[in-house]
Image (cartoon, rainbow, N blue to C red):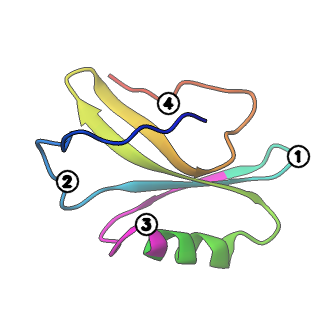
């Protein structure tokens, strides 16, 4: 990991209602995806997700929309293997 001191604020747009994506999966390949809306913050999402994890692997991401479409950016948890692109046009 590399860490640098920030020089200026980067964001020119504040997302007031982020959409979180929670994924659970098992070693057997079973998976569940949930979109979490109207969460107070990522801690709220993590509390919800951990209460439903029940021995499964957990990943929390956030949806990002730009001129290329929608991307899912992982915030916390393990990446699912094999890696796959989660971008839609």
Is residue 29 shown left or right of residue 87? right
Badge 4 is on which residue?
A: 86
Badge 3 is on which residue?
A: 42
Is residue 67 shown left or right of residue 25? left
Give the crowd class for mark 2: few <14, some 14-19, many >=20 residues within 10 Å: few
Please identify the quarter of the rendering in which residue 64 is found: top left
Of the two numbered discs 2 and 1 on the same chain, state the one appearing first in sequence.
2
Q: Which residue is drawn at 31% across and 41% down?
A: 6
Of the two numbered discs 2 and 4 on the same chain, state the one appearing first in sequence.
2
Q: How far apart are marks 3 and 2 (CA)?
A: 13 Å
Q: Give the range drawn in magenta.
A: 32-43
Between residue 9 and residue 23, name the one nearer to us: 9
Q: Do the residues labelled 1 and 3 touch (CB within 8 Å)?
A: no
Is residue 77 shown left or right of residue 45? right
- Element at label 3: helix
Residue 45 magenta: no
Question: Residue 39: image x %, image y %?
Answer: 35, 72
From this view, report whether residue 79 is shown above or below residue 54: above
Q: Do the residues labelled 2 and 4 touch (CB within 8 Å)?
A: no
Which image quarter is the C terminus in? top left
Nearer the observer: mark 4 or 1; the answer is: 4
Give the crowd class for mark 1: few <14, some 14-19, many >=20 residues within 10 Å: few
Of the two numbered discs 4 and 3 on the same chain, state the one appearing first in sequence.
3
From this view, report whether residue 32 is shown above or below residue 40: above
Q: Which residue is drawn at 75% across and 33% down?
A: 81
Q: Are marks 4 and 3 in contact (CB under 8 Å)?
A: no
From this view, report whether residue 56 is shown above or below residue 68: below
Badge 1 is on which residue?
A: 28
Please identify the quarter of the rendering in which residue 83 is found: top right
Q: Distance between the residues labelled 2 and 1?
A: 36 Å
């Amino acid at each position: 990991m590399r860490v640098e001191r920030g020089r200026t604020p980067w964001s020119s747009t504040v997302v007031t209602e982020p959409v979180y994506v929670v994924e659970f999966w098992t070693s057997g390949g079973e998976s569940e995806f949930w979109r979490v809306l109207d969460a107070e913050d990522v801690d709220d999402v993590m509390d919800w997700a951990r209460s439903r994890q029940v021995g499964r692997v957990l990943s929390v991401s956030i949806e990002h929309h730009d001129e290329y479409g929608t991307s899912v950016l992982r915030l916390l948890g393990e990446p699912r293997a094999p890696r796959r692109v989660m971008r839609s046009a």
